[in-house]
Image: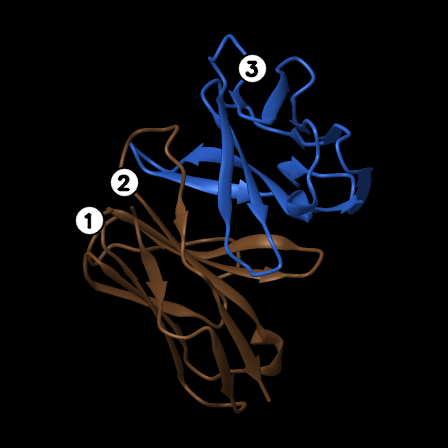
Amino acid sequence: AQKITQTQPGMFVQEKEAVTLDCTYDTSDQSYGLFWYKQPSSGEMIFLIYQGSYDEQNATEGRYSLNFQKARKSANLVISASQLGDSAMYFCAMRETSGGSNYKLTFGKGTLLTVNP
Amino acid sequence: DVKVTQSSRYLVKRTGEKVFLECVQDMDHENMFWYRQDPGLGLRLIYFSYDVKMKEKGDIPEGYSVSREKKERFSLILESASTNQTSMYLCASRPIGLAGVTQYFGPGTRLTVL
């Protein structure tokens, strides 16, 4: 069963507007974490933001914020004031414990964001 | 800064060849990972390694093997390359513990099997 679902294959946003990228997840663990990554056309994976399941406040990093709704099992990424350089593929990923303190990630299929001037 | 390097950015091989993809990290990380990335499928885990000489299968290990003889180096091996292994391969590493710490990714190797 798919553990991370990103329902938007592609999204368009006007420069300077805000955009929300959706991510829902499925887990029976009480302790887990959600990551968001950005992958520009150059291919490198850039870490954006992290939310732990026990974190009481939504994570924020500059223009990025994570709208974490635990009961709905959603962890949507909000980008405020979009810039042309935000055009990229965005991946949501969930941390899973692999025994002890070893963790692995399960990724969604990604959302391609295009920012229009 | 953490640095993860991969031996090649682009690689072209023939069907049936044995292919080695090398990954090196310079931060003494215990955990290392190999993913393949295909359009519309996201990143899928091939193999991961908790520590030297330790490995576990990921979600799509068929057709691949790995080697980790030294802590800093994690190799992905395609014993007999096939055209359906044409893909982008990403290596990553992270330290043990510290649940909120990200994986650090290499620049990727785009492999084409003809």
Q: CB of mark 3 within 8 Å of CB of mark 2?
A: no
Name the residue type under label 3: Asn
**Residue A109 in view (yes/no):** no
Rendering coords of residue B70 (x, y %): 17, 62
Residue pictured at 57% horizontal, 53% vertical: B43
Residue pictured at 52% horizontal, 53% vertical: B59
Determine crowd level at label 2: few under 14, some 14-19, many 20+ residues with C-alpha closer than 10 A.
many
| Residue tagged 2 | B95
Element at label 1: loop
Rendering coords of residue A34 (x, y %): 53, 29
Look at discs 3 and 2 and give the one toward the viewer: 3
Element at label 2: loop
Residue pictured at 47% horizontal, 64% vertical: B108
Name the residue type under label 1: Asp
Question: Measured along the vertical axis of the image, is residue B3 above or below residue A115?
Answer: below
Q: Quadrant of residue A111?
A: top right
Rendering coords of residue A84 (x, y %): 70, 45
Classify the position of the N terminus of chain A by image quarter.
top right
Name the residue type under label 2: Pro
| Residue tagged 1 | B28
| Residue tagged 3 | A58
* Disc 3 with disc 2 on a shared chain: no
- B94 and A100: which is toward the camera: B94
